[in-house]
Image (tube, rainbow, N blue to C red):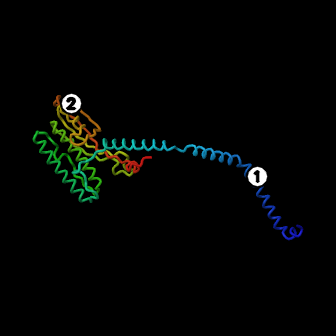
Amino acid sequence: MNDFWQENKRLVTIAGCGLCVFLIGLLVINSLYGSEVSAMNASVNKVRGELQKARYSASARDEALAANEALRASLGALESRIAFQPRPEFMLPPRSKTDEASSDYFAAVERVRESLAVLAGRKRISLPPGLDLEPVMTFSVETYERHLAALDLLDRALRHAIEHNVKQIKRIRIDLDPNFRARKGLGTIEETTIEIKAASAPETITAWLQATQTEAFGQVLPIRDIEARTRRAKIDELDVSVTFSAIRLHLPEALAEGELD
């Protein structure tokens, strides 16, 4: 031992000093942070224990899957009742280009104008010139797609009006959703509005609006707003403004694909 000490006393001294410094540092750290470390370890152990207890059984999993299926079915039923589904002749082919979309839209406009003019002429019902449809000049296929859907809803609403002898269609206005081109983008619900101003007897207006809430032309037409007042010149007639909605639902991707958790 004496020989070892003589040969290695420098190494042993340095090692001993290092051990002392380590023990002193450990004591200092423990005195300063020991309670916090103990509390954190206790919290971790508590959470770990709760997680181990939170395991679900097979029956709980089956119940969750059943609730998931019911929710998906309800969501599908809600979408079918709310979302406006254009007829095939008012839909663009997949991957349409701008010039093709423009051609399809203007062809549909002419078709609707001519068809409704014939129907209204037979009953001497007054329609606004050109149905008040302003030219749509855009390079956006999505814009033409929205205007085609609005044209479809307008066509159905006016056919109901003509069928029920609404005396006069005074004005028509179509507005895309304000957020359609906004930076923040569309929300879950996108709403294109079609406002129709008409004049006729109260019972005729009532019959027209009731008809729009049936599936006589394939789908109920959602009404967003109605304003009516007695005409000044003819107290037995109403001036009415009816705003219909062509609604699109933009569901989160997981919901659209049926991946509900």
* Quarter where residue 78 is shown: top left
Locate the N terminus and report the quarter of the image it occupies.
Answer: bottom right
Q: Position of residue 102 (x, y in %)?
A: 23, 56
Q: Position of residue 212 (x, y in %)?
A: 23, 38
* Quarter where residue 203 is shown: top left
Query: How many tags in the picture?
Result: 2
> From what the image shows, is residue 126 above or below residue 235?
below
Q: Is residue 237 left or right of residue 83?
A: left
* Quarter where residue 20 is shown: bottom right
User: Which amino acid lies under the numbered mark 2 shown in the image of this protein?
Assistant: Thr
Residue at 54% over, 45% down: 55
Q: Is residue 166 left or right of residue 220?
A: left
Q: Residues within 10 Å of mark 1 (few under 14, many from 20)?
A: few
Q: Earlier in the sequence, mark 1 or mark 2?
A: 1
User: Which amino acid lies under the numbered mark 1 shown in the image of this protein?
Assistant: Leu
Judge by depth and name the residue closer to the eye, 74 or 32. 74
Judge by depth and name the residue closer to the eye, 250 or 179. 250
Give the numbered dot on residue 27.
Answer: 1
The residue under label 2 is 230
Check disc 2 and report its element: helix, strand or loop. strand
Q: Is residue 115 left or right of residue 23?
A: left
Q: Position of residue 33 (x, y in %)?
A: 70, 49
Residue situated furthest right in the rendering: 2
Residue situated furthest top in the rendering: 235
> From what the image shows, is residue 233 above or below residue 56?
above
Residue at 82% over, 65% down: 12
Check disc 1 and report its element: helix, strand or loop. helix
